Image: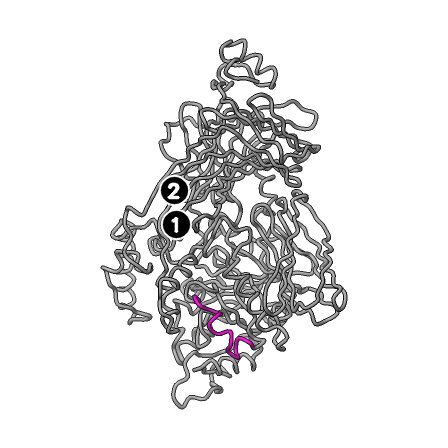
Amino acid sequence: MNFKKLALFGVAATVAVAAAWQLPTSSSSFAPVLFADSMKCDLAGYKSASGLTAAMEQDVLTVTWAGQSGAELRARYAVDNGQPLIRELSVHKSGGQWASLGQNLAPEYHVVSGIRRLGQDQAAPLRAAGIELTPDVVNKQRWYAFWDAPLVLPGGPEMQESAARARGLAAGREGRGGRGGRGFDEAAALQPSRAFGPPRTAAEIKRADSSFHATSCSVKTDGQSLEVTFPGLSMGIFAGDLRFTVYRGTNLMRMDAIAKTNEQWIAYKYDAGLKGLSTSLTQRIAWNDTGGHAQSNRVGGVVNPVLARVKAENRLIMAEGKNGSIAAFPPPHTFFFTREKDTNLGFVWYRKDAEGRFAIGVGMPEREEETQYVENFALYNAPPGTAQKMGVYFYVSPDAAEPTRQAVMAFTHDDMFKPLPGYKTMVNHFHLDFTGRVRASGSFDTPLQDLVAMKSLGLNVVGLSDFHFELHPNDPGPLRLADQKDYFEATRRASDRDFLVTAWEEPSAYFGGHYNIMWPKNVYWTKVRQPGQPFVENDPKYGKVYHTGSAEDVQQMMDAEGAYWYHAHPRTKSTTGYPDMIWDKPYVKNDRYLGLAFKPGMGQDNSEVRMCEWRCFDAVDTMNNMYANSGVRPKYIIADIDTYRKGPEDDLYANFPVNYLKIDKTPGPDEDYSPVLKSLRDGNFFVTTGEILIKSYNVEGTAAKRTITADVEWTFPLNFVEVVWGDGKKVEHQVISATDLGAFGTKRFSIPFDATGKAWVRFAVWDSAGNGAFVQPIWLNTSKTTN
């Protein structure tokens, strides 16, 4: 269909096009732009399949795919002055007629970038270990910065506010007798003092809008998905392609800018969306606010020159019309780099461009809202030459906004961790000032909003970490022990049937790096052992009390009480250089050391297909290769949260990986927690972002002939599964494509595995949205291991 020729014939041509496409013919509803550039599409990678087709007719590419519940979706692509367009997006229910939801929809991207710096919190442990901060050391570690804010300038308004708040906190500490007091340096507070290196300058910050110079496209079938790629994308220092991906069996459509930069040390954020939506087809914008109430905008106000960021529940916004709805939302986890708090900053947006015309999309703001965290907004990494995937999802539905919202929420189980028979969900590492807040409430029975929010996610075991910035962590006796007594009682009262709150801690004493210690019961202890003070004493008020002054003391205490520990945020923050620097230490080789935390967003790189590749998986795989055949039990990766105060209005699910422990019952508040720790120690658990469940896993067989079997359930279409193993020297991956497995499926994987010369093995599953689930490594010296 040649639009340039059709346009010459005016209304008659419009009616002809409408008849051919079954579009509305009124001048108010039919998109006025009919011109199209000449466009050729390479179909060499396309394979025709029922329910997933592509066809080129003159200068328009038509993609049709089978959706959910009998729906069928259609997108027509064209190019206008180099700009790729969705000429028409339509849908019909089973047995119904095609109905248009949008015409001449134009993709748009906005990118803001700065320069990545090493955090002072990363530099400190390296210096303490005697490691010189050479350019090579700094350049390796700076990609994993957490306390970094590349878009916040010295002396800016954010830093002025932060300095004022710091002055108030310092004065408050002095007024309370200097508890935890530190001197206040206003000059240091007026610049991002946590960043290592010279002060930032405005010239480092670069902003760019997308522009396109497309003359062609390519079409590729990959299992159940079909990709349409347009070259010629430019965004300032980034350049690359624009890609649309649809998936047979679901109404999802993903849009990606796949772009590279050759600049050094780039950290960036992006906004992405579709403009050109018309109120003649979609009359209103809809979302749920953070209180769960339905909200809408009928696009009747003034024109918006900039994006209107919406603090929407579940990271979801919709354009609704009489023919159906289009929802926009980000990938549920990989979109988020790690922050100190999970506050909802407004991750979706709309914009009124003209009367009757608007846009919707997703994006990140440029900074934190709470002034004490303005230096903590690290953005994404873009190492030179890496293909950054800047993704946004659209869900095309013949239904109204609310059923469309429910359909989208099914991909994240309504932002909950789905119950799985034989398993209980567990998360750890929360700095909530829990004890201080329940004391201030006047009752240990006061429900804190933090725990209310976490319980609503479907969590069964929540490990707290008081004694971080609050209470008296380093007190040698009466003050800390009194705090512990209240901590123990308050967590006991916060627990419920099938909901256990534990009084654990991040002591970070003597071993090196930051770590979490988990107890099977409440234990009184101090991190200070004064001269002449016994290791264990019987206190008349608190009973048995341990006093520790060395790694050996802590190890002996854990051995006596059945505790376990693992490193928090490995290879970054105050654990930079760890566990690497202490792999040879006896307390790391000891079986009470479980391994390290899975907190993936620190060093988020959108070119990677696995979360936390170097910080988490490389670290644990290296450890297991070192300890293979040494009598040491395997080391594991444990889902860990490490955030501060939160509430039901926060965006928790997106930032919460979770452990599914293979235990039948959640321990009660007056029982010991040994089943929880035994499941962790034995590796009888899997970790997931929530969308993928590994319901069972076995390594079967003997000697060299083994078989990996796993029962897997998922929501987003899968990408690949992998078997990972080590032989004591190197780590290898067997990656098996799973793109033929569409949305909302189950499958028993049975993968032959030659164990010859191999020491350990693990299994993982990754989906098309970057979500993942994995089991723990096991040694291959037994005939059969079940997890």
Looking at the picture, how far across and down is residue 497, in whole percent? 61, 62
Can you identify the residue that label 2 sits on?
237
| Figure quadrant of residue 309 | top left
| Figure quadrant of residue 41 | top right
Looking at the picture, how far across and down is residue 616, in whole percent? 52, 61
Report the amino acid beneath label 1: Ile
Q: Residue at x 57, y 15 (%)?
A: 17
For mark 1, give the secondary structure.
strand
Can you identify the residue that label 1 sits on?
266
Mark before the other along the chain sequence, 2 or 1 = 2
Q: Is residue 579 magenta?
A: yes
Query: Which color scheme is applied?
Result: one colour
Q: Which of the image's four quarters has the N terminus?
A: top right
For mark 2, give the secondary structure.
loop
Question: Does residue 275 appear anywhere in the picture?
Answer: yes
Q: Residues within 10 Å of mark 1 (few under 14, many from 20)?
A: many
Where are the magenta residues, as a range?
575-589
Report the amino acid beneath label 2: Ile
- Disc ID at residue 497: none
* Contact? badges 2 and 1 (CB < 8 Å): yes
Looking at the picture, how far across and down is residue 708, in whole percent? 71, 59
Q: Vertically, is 22 above or below 559?
A: above
Front-most of 183 and 712? 712
Inter-mark Cα distance, 2 to 1: 10 Å
Q: Is residue 697 magenta?
A: no
Front-most of 189 and 437? 189
> Taking 113 as reference, is 582 left or right?
right
Looking at the picture, how far across and down is residue 419, in whole percent? 65, 54
